[in-house]
Image: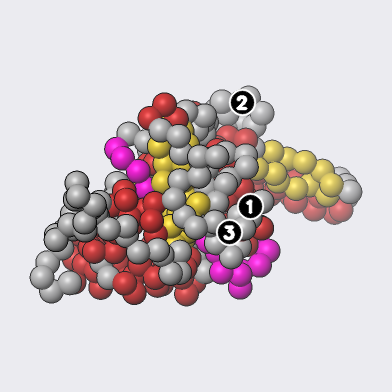
Amino acid sequence: MSNKEEIRGEVRNIFDKIFKTPYLMTEDEEGEGFIQTTCPYKTCDGRGTLTIYVNGYRKAKNCRCYEDEILRRKLKNSNLDDSLWNQKLNLSNLEGVILHPIQNPPERELQLTKQGKPKAVQEPETPEEHVYRAYQHIQMPNGLEAFIHTYVRKTLEYINENPIQQVKNLMLLGDTGRGKTFTASMIGKEYLLNEKKAYFTTMRTLVADVMKKEKDIESIVSDVDLLIIDELGYEYHTDSGWAVTQIKEFLRTRYNKKLPVVCTTNKYPIEIENLYDKSLMSLFHGTYFMVYVDNKQDGDYRYQIADNSLSDFGLELPQGQQGGNNND
């Protein structure tokens, strides 16, 4: 045997050892290695890679089982429900109103007595009345589900192709059982499928984790591609306003990093403003789509959206709209 053949044989043995070694797979260079004995798809020998030849050169390609494990780990790290992986986004039973604040909302109509005179004491305005008086409504032509898909596509496009573009955030409002948490979680799933990081938490847990310092929340808030905050407004508040200060820091960090936030709440806008303050409400008004979600059978709400970036999402502000529910 010639020296060349011996060298080729040694090189071949080295390659065989490399390619037969269980592939050490991590999510973003951290976590446990990827080790399994068999491939569930029977396309690799369990190491998570396939050997392919490109222009005569031997190369490794990830097997589908490897990609599945990456997604599984991302799902685990995201704090999202495992059951989401086998579900599809279906919002056909839901409608939504996305609220856009009127710059100079009309004054409340005076409440009159039976004699037609103004009442001496006005009844407090309900949160629902405030929504119809103080917010414009913009029709969403293709419905809520189509808008959510567009939201995912456009925000990913901003992150991937135009990172200096200020990304729009999303606030899902509505009563309990309206699918807000499910919708937010499915948005997170789409981010994972597009090889992005997502993290799900409740606002109560987020604030508590900062206080207890059990997790590196500051790093999570500043680094994940999508932050999902459930139950906005249900965190514990003290007279010192510490929680509000922390929430402002979270949201401003995301704003400065130009990374999206999706949050859910059962509260109306005026309740959110009263709980926090006008500066935080200004941030919500300026950088969030505020979507009120309802069941179709419970009302005649139209799909709505509002913002100066409406055209990106296939929407436009009606001419002369003065707020209130548009039931034409």
Which residue corresponds to mark 1?
315
- Residue 155's quadrant in the figure? bottom right
Q: Is residue 131 above or below residue 73?
A: below
The C terminus sits in image quarter: top right
Residue at figure coordinates x 14%, y 60% from the top left: 121
x%, y% of residue 37?
51, 30
Q: Which residues are magenta?
A: 159-176
Q: Amino acid at mark 2?
A: Tyr
Q: What is the spatial separation of the Cα atoms under label 3 and label 2, in whole angstroms?
A: 58 Å
Q: Is residue 322 above or below residue 264?
A: below
Q: Amino acid at mark 1?
A: Leu
Q: Nearer the viewer, mark 3 or mark 2?
A: 3
Q: Is residue 312 above or below residue 256?
A: above
Q: Earlier along the polypeptide chain: callout 1 or callout 2?
A: 2
Which residue corresponds to mark 2?
41
Is residue 216 one of those drawn in magenta?
no
Pointer 1 local density, CA inside 10 Å: few below 14, some 14–19, many at least 20: some
As drawn, is 108 to the left or to the right of 55? left
Residue at figure coordinates x 29%, y 38% from the top left: 176
